[in-house]
Amino acid sequence: MYRNLELSVNKQRLAEWNIAERRRKSFRNLQYINRRSLCFRAPTILNLFKTSENNIDSINLLKQLEKTSSFCAVVIAKNNQILYESHASDFATDQLHSIQSITKTLAHLALGRLIEGGRVDPECAVGEYVPEAGDAYAKVSIQQVLDMDVGTNFAENYIAPYTPCPVRGDPVGYARQEIAMGWRLPPDGENEFGVRDFVAWLVEKPRIPNGVTLYTSPNTDLLGWIIERASGRLLASHIEDIVTDAGIEATFHISTDCMGVPVISGGGVMTARDLVRYGLLIARQNSDFLRDTMSGAGTIYSSSPSRRYRNHLLTNGTWVGHPGYAGQFLMIDPFNQAAAAFFSVLETEDGAKDGYFDEIIMALEQALEQLR
């Protein structure tokens, strides 16, 4: 079915599974495409009951998004009720789908629990917990990593040059990260390496002190390393706890690197209904850590002063959430115990489209506003 051919690279420098014409199918089968993965089942399912007592179906922007060729699914729930659900004609309610960078929110949940419990001080330097983290991270605070406020020689460029290992310190892009994740093969003659090897290989790069988010996926894999070191438990055990607490119904899959480390920077796969269950778990936190997330602190996301990246979540002070590459979004309203999960797949060359995420955010904001 899927072979290593899918992990090779085309002339546009993308892994074959991620080229535009294959991306929609691949996002539903990434658990089979990646080299290695773990899976988890919850012992008890959070039962969700469907109701239509709302006006969400009158939101024009949401209906317009549902009519696009990119659309896959949207599920909106409050407490234990599904208030709105829509699926594309080729997308079943039990269809698994890559959540891409929404996976980063695992770091928010797991590390937040350790911070709340006094096991981790976010103001401490990374090197106090993980001395092996390397030049890029040794002296920065954990809070800086949580807020994507670290300058390194890594750039989140999804069509970065796919070349053999560059000289250490030279600019490096997402192509190298995908090798570490097990999402593409290394160049001929080069051995595999893991996400923590990649983190430690990066070097510090001075950043412009403008307060803007420096979105960097290796930051999340570093947080997984800190979670493991500070707790004395495997990162996988924290993921199992979260899956259990969320009460997801289907299997949750997550990529692992060549060392067996879960790739929490983007390796998660689940159904849309389970993503909304997961969002409801975030809504139920009722923690100082979540309140701090929504306080207005953090970095400025995408040059929009109303949106901040704090504690590994995006927020505008009313909701928290996270985007995922090529069209995924999870939005949570903790004050009203509501969540909205949105799946889509942009079939542009680089998986991006100007203004697309703004449209998704506006539509989900309007939907959650209907529930208040």
Image: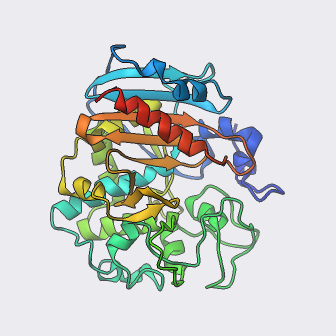
Name the spot of residue 13 as percent of width and height, x first: 77, 59
Q: Nearer the viewer, residue 111 or 261?
A: 111
Q: Nearer the viewer, residue 88 or 31?
A: 88
Q: Is the C terminus in the top left, top right, bottom left or bottom right quadrant?
A: top left
Q: Residue at x 77, y 57 (%)?
A: 9
Above or below — where is 368 with respect to 109? above
Name the spot of residue 63 as percent of width and height, x first: 55, 23
Q: Nearer the viewer, residue 354 or 28?
A: 354
Q: Residue at x 51, y 80 (%)?
A: 207
Name the spot of residue 170 as percent of width and height, x first: 66, 83
Above or below — where is 191 with respect to 52? below
- The answer to whether residue 250 of the structure is visible from this angle is no
Q: Is the N terminus in the top left, top right, bottom left or bottom right quadrant?
A: top right
In the image, is 92 to the left or to the right of 353? Answer: left
Q: Quadrant of residue 179?
A: bottom right
Q: Quadrant of residue 22?
A: top right
Name the spot of residue 17 as percent of width and height, x first: 70, 46
Name the residue at the right extreme.
11
Above or below — where is 254 with respect to 184? above
Q: Residue at x 33, y 56 (%)?
A: 108
How many numbered marks have been drawn onto this rendered protein structure? 0
